[in-house]
């Protein structure tokens, strides 16, 4: 039941919960001031329970008014909680213990749900896998599933932009705790000043620090030992296992409402989490999980996203002009924690926002069963470089064609401009005009003719690229772009492959390439949903860097992170009958 209007809410601060090893974690508890027992919604986050971020996805006061207790807890080693901070590695058992503690509180009716975004989407997942008996449902928003697919690495490339700034940001609390018993407060002031100075400088210059395994901004501040572990365990599934949900869904017993964004840094894992829950969840309830994807960036739901306004119906204020974001989540929790038939399970399991058309659409599955995969082949007369080169894209198969060439200089990398990113403030996520990027000589541009009729692309995007490099190791990047009639080049989705990890997805060990030899690379561009309107063009950009989103490949073939030396790689992209390069687009004809 809901709380009658006019009744008060009680907030208990710093409520202790003892974990199985004796460590005390503390939470803020928001609850009805009236007597009674209520279902509990729990969030566990490392960013500070007393800060606004704890209520960024669900407004605790409004949720309590609807007849719930809300608990927001500092994770181990963060803010007011005791213990040592080990990012992402101690959350599973702490999550289990906290759920069971919450279910036994005198104002709890024993039914617990979990909510939250990003890191506290991850704390939901690892708790779900531990199977606490009183956890009944969860809503992980923009949460990852595979640490090697956008958290630490992406197809062998380091997610430098995200993890470097994240570790610096998290270092503020590390320093506060390190110096909290120091008699001289000036020591804390000096340490914080240096860290904040490095945080402010990382975008303009700090990301360029070499060698990576001695990354200066983090070495100077000594706040992130886990960052440097990556250089001992690159692309290591054993080391990253505590951070990984992939392959463990058969242990998940509770239903999840998975929410993501087309420009979110964890987009593909949000989709994967949903699909695997539908297929492999341990219970019938888990297999009723749902998926919603908007045109959003990470933790950024409000228009504009990047440079584009997707319309009022795209905002959390009134999704599809039907329901606000909070009420949508409460329908899920009312269904599973209160036993109210809200009708949410009668609705299609997938709801997506189709960009371009700027409409929401319900679907029965992902990928769409009616989507038809079509190959769009790369073509040129050998001069696809830059925006006004001769590169074209069409469904006609390649024949006898000259290859394209460019030089990849990691000292002058292609800069990140928009996309599914989580970087410092200088690098905003979302859709941004790519023409400045496409005006570089080290970017190949392949475009269709203006479309005679609209084409909807909805589903996973893969690029097959035949390439030759002068280096023993290098990178290739591909980006799908919607070119508007006025030339505006809207980035949709992109991906990268590090050549030594070209066969990693097939279970093979990393190996260097032979300079001068042609290799076929599969580049996963994740997924999108976009209507290319009549008169627009479909474009594919090909290059070898997207910095600082991903680290620069130094082209040396040396061990990961040791290089201060950067070498230029001569790249050749083949697109002939024997080496067809193409992008696979899932075309929807009957939207």
Image (spheres, rainbow, N blue to C red):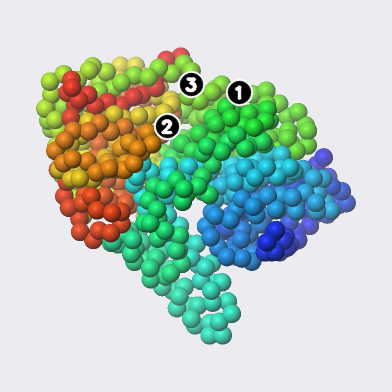
Name the residue located 68 percent from the left edge and 61 percent from the top edge.
Answer: 21
300 horizontally vs 37: left or right: left
Q: Residue 516's spot in the image, x, y percent?
A: 14, 38
- Is 524 in front, or is 519? 519
- Is 204 in front, or is 523? 523
Label 1 – label 2 distance at C-alpha: 20 Å
Name the residue located 74 percent from the left edge and 50 percent from the top edge.
Answer: 100
Q: Residues within 10 Å of mark 3 (few under 14, many from 20)?
A: some
Give the mark nearer the N terminus: 1 vs 2. Answer: 1
Read off the residue under disc 3. Answer: 368
Q: What element carries label 3?
A: loop
| Label at residue 348 | 1
Read off the residue under disc 2. Answer: 527
CB-based contact (under 8 Å), mark 1 and mark 2: no
CB-based contact (under 8 Å), mark 2 and mark 3: no
Label 1 – label 3 distance at C-alpha: 12 Å
Q: Reply above or below: 303 against 175.
A: above
Q: Residue 143's spot in the image, x, y percent?
A: 53, 43
């Amino acid at each position: 039941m809901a709380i009658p209007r006019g009744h008060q809410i009680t907030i208990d601060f710093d409520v202790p919960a003892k974990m199985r090893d004796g460590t005390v974690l503390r939470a803020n508890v928001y609850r009805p001031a009236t007597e009674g027992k209520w279902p509990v919604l729990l969030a566990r986050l490392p960013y500070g329970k007393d800060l606004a971020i704890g209520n960024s996805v669900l407004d605790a006061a409004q949720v309590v008014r609807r007849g719930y207790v809300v608990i927001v807890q500092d994770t181990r080693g963060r803010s007011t909680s005791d213990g040592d901070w080990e990012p992402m590695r101690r959350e599973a058992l702490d999550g289990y213990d906290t759920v069971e503690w919450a279910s036994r509180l005198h104002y709890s009716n024993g039914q617990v749900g979990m909510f939250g975004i990003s890191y506290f989407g991850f704390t939901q997942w690892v708790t779900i896998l531990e199977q606490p008996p009183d956890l009944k449902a969860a809503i992980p928003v923009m949460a990852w599933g595979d640490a090697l697919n956008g958290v630490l690495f992406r197809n062998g490339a380091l997610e430098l932009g995200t993890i470097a700034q994240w570790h610096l940001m998290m270092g503020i609390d590390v320093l506060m705790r390190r110096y909290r018993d120091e008699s001289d407060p000036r020591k804390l002031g000096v340490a914080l000043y240096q860290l904040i100075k490095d945080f402010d400088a990382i975008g303009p210059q700090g990301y360029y620090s070499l060698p990576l395994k001695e990354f200066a901004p983090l070495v100077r501040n000594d706040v992130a030992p886990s960052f440097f572990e990556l250089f001992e365990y690159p692309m290591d599934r054993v080391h990253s296992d505590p951070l990984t949900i992939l392959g463990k869904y058969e242990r998940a017993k509770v239903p999840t409402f998975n929410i993501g964004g087309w420009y979110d840094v964890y987009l593909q894992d949000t989709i994967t989490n949903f699909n695997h829950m539908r297929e492999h969840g341990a219970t019938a309830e888990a297999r009723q999980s749902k998926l919603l994807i908007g045109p959003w960036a990470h933790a950024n739901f409000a228009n504009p996203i990047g440079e584009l306004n997707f319309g009022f119906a795209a905002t959390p204020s009134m999704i599809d002009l039907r329901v606000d974001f909070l009420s949508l989540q409460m329908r899920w929790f009312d269904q599973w924690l209160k036993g109210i038939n809200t009708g949410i399970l009668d609705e299609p399991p997938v709801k997506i926002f189709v960009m371009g058309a700027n409409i929401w659409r319900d679907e029965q599955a992902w990928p769409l069963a009616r989507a038809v995969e079509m190959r769009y082949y790369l073509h040129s007369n050998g001069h696809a470089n830059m925006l006004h080169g001769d590169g074209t894209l069409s469904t006609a198969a390649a024949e006898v064609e000259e290859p394209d060439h460019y030089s990849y200089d990691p000292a002058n990398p292609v800069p990140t401009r928009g996309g599914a990113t989580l970087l410092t403030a200088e690098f905003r996520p979302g859709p941004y005009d790519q023409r400045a990027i496409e005006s570089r000589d080290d970017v190949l541009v392949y475009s269709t003719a203006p479309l005679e009729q609209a084409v909807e692309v909805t589903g996973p995007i893969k690029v097959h690229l035949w390439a030759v490099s002068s280096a023993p190791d290098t990178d290739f990047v591909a980006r799908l772009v919607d070119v508007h009639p006025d030339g505006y080049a809207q980035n949709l989705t992109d991906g990268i492959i590090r050549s030594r990890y070209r066969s990693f997805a097939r279970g093979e060990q990393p190996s260097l390439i032979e300079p001068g030899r042609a290799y076929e690379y599969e580049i996963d561009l994740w997924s999108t949903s976009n209507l290319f309107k009549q008169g627009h063009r479909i474009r594919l950009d090909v290059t070898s860097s997207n910095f600082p989103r991903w680290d620069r490949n130094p082209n040396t073939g040396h061990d990961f992170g040791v290089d201060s030396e950067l070498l230029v790689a001569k790249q050749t992209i083949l697109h002939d009958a024997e080496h067809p390069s193409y992008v696979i687009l899932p075309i929807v004809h009957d939207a």
